[in-house]
Image (spheres, helix red, strand yellow):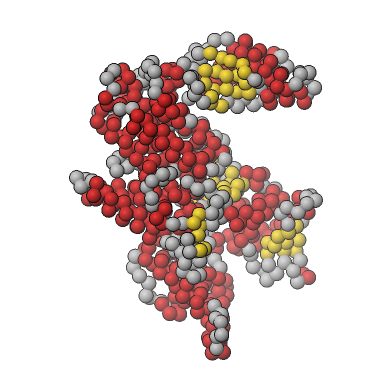
Amino acid sequence: MFTKEQQLIEAKIKEFCAANDIPLAELKWQPIPFSGEWGFATSFFQTAANEARAGKGGKPVPQRAQEMAEQVKGQIGSVDGISRIDAVKGYLNLYFSTAAYASRVVDEVLASGLNFGRGAKKNERVMVEYAQPNTNHSFHIGHARNTILGEVLARLVEFAGYETIRASYPGDLGLGVITVMWIYEKLYKGQEPEGVHERGQWLAKLYVEATALLEKKDNETPEETAQREAYDAERREMYRKWDAGDEYVRKLWHETREWSLEELREVLKMLDVKMDVWFYESEVDEPSKVIVDELIARDIATDERPTGGAVIVKIDEKLGLTKEKYRTNVILRKDGTTLYLTKDLALAKVKFEKYQVDRSIYVVDSRQALHLQQAFAILKLWGFPQSEKCYHLGYGFVSLPEGAMSARRGRVVLFKDVADEAVKRVLAVESEKSGDVPADEREKIAYQIGMGALTYSMLSVDNNKDIVFDINEALSFDGRTGPYIQNAYVRANSILKKSKVEGQKSDRGLSTFDYELTKHEIELIEQISRFPQTVEQAANEYRPLVMAAYAYDLANAFHSFYHAVNVMQTEDEKTRNARLQLVMAAKQTIENALRLLDIQSPDVM
């Protein structure tokens, strides 16, 4: 927003330091919170510390930092747009006049529109991997947390300037998948329901029933034991046939897998998620075995199969670590079958070589932290420099008030059920409040608000914390909720509709704030100005919560402004016009923040 002034001042600082043989550290600018005027600052402490390490300076670091700040201040002189420059405690502080700063912020938002806050193009390609439930089950609220976190992170890094690829890696292998195929083939073939969601949820019920049939019961009779063991033998024979490439079993697998994927695609459409790449666990199973051979040949892995063991990687030993950190890990069982780790290595190879990914972000629950750290360490041993920029965005477990969710027990909350309930509750309220709004429009609004409530409930909790999912709390519209933020957008929209100022482009770039701003205007301008910095922070730290918290603070500042400042009744025309421009800027910034949070902005509520 103040790039031109910042670049000019940085050039003068670099010129001064070069002329005086000072090892200048990277200049990091920070906004100065409003205290009568706005500004931004940079510190010379790191530069003074660098100088001291180089055996120069000869003074304590704080004293030398202050001396540098004072010398640089003298070097800079006057700069257009900067009202004054101070050197205080090793910091160089640059201030703007209040009216100039407010005008600059508002004009920047209105000129940039949907691109306000967008970062400069970066030279790295990022892949975010998320939305990857196992097939032959149904999409539940825990999967929703994964998907929402991944999508919002993808939006953030993309908006911050990174080329971004969205990838899904559904688990379509394993005994759990075969279990559903087995019971379907044995008891329910041809009885599948028609609807996409109904069919996906039906598969989840089959899994629960199959688990009950295959699970050992207390005090079971010899006949029941024999029956259970016979069922298990049938299931494992089907798995053997799948592994051998049996044509019939493979066809059944493709058919039932597609039912799950159809439901997943429908859910992603509901969440406005568009995947760029689909990976499947089954596709990397065989290639991962080839990778094991390569790792053995390169003395990264140790083959203990000749002595009855498995193929292992002694990660700590290979990295030269004296203390245990990554441990030793199996990458191929003694029977020649792969593990999740083996397939993750194969997938990473595809990411790095085929898609030329520089950064790979894995949105996977926190329980897999060690597993992924081991994978990244092996990738480093293997020679992939991208291993240093692999990142695990972990998230806490989603449980229910009555305890942990369990697909085996059928104790899950299905996402579609929660979404439908959210829209139903909002629609009941909207029907009472908005009788003059056409029914189809009310349904659209209810969908936007209901999904906003559900989405924000997943983002407003730190990703590392567990969530006890309570549908009543998730759909509450009071406090830190999606609808509260959406309502700020609606109120701004209402003011602008009444004023008929929005869309009058001749007013843009002419906002003048040369009057005494109220504390509510100051806070709103302060929040708007923080948006670009918040985008960068959330993207660089891989933390959707940063943007979620900011959106609430911005909405809160607008609600306070809305209640305290009656824009339409402002008598002075110039002041009223400036305030309308501020409302336009606030509305745009709220919309941009909501879009990054994968939440729609309804025009009315």
Q: Quadrant of residue 311?
A: bottom right
Nearer to us in this view, 505 or 447: 447
Count the marks: 0
Return the x and y of residue 60 as percentages of the image width and height. Answer: 75, 21
Where residue 479 appears, as percent x and y from the top left, is 41, 44
Q: Residue at x 41, y 66 (%)?
A: 201
Question: For this view, does 527 lie left or right of residue 423?
Answer: right
Tell me if 346 is positioned left or right of 470 in this view.
right
Please provide percent x and percent y for residue 297.
Answer: 74, 58
Q: Position of residue 375 (x, y in %)?
A: 65, 54
Q: What residue appears at the point 48 percent right and 19 percent down from the top-left corner? A: 36
Q: Is residue 325 above or below residue 113?
A: below
Visible residue check, residue 30: yes
The quadrant the C terminus occupies is top left
Q: Residue at x 54, y 43 (%)?
A: 543
Which residue corresponds to the image point at 50% horizontal and 70% vertical from the top-left? 408
Q: Examine the rendered structure and indicate whether residue 359 appears above or below residue 240.
A: above
Q: Is residue 356 above or below residue 206?
A: above
In this orientation, does residue 245 appear? no
State the residue in front, 405 or 197: 405
Can you say whether 164 is above or below 146 in the image?
above
Q: Residue furthest left?
A: 436
Out of 280 and 451, give the one closest to the viewer.
451
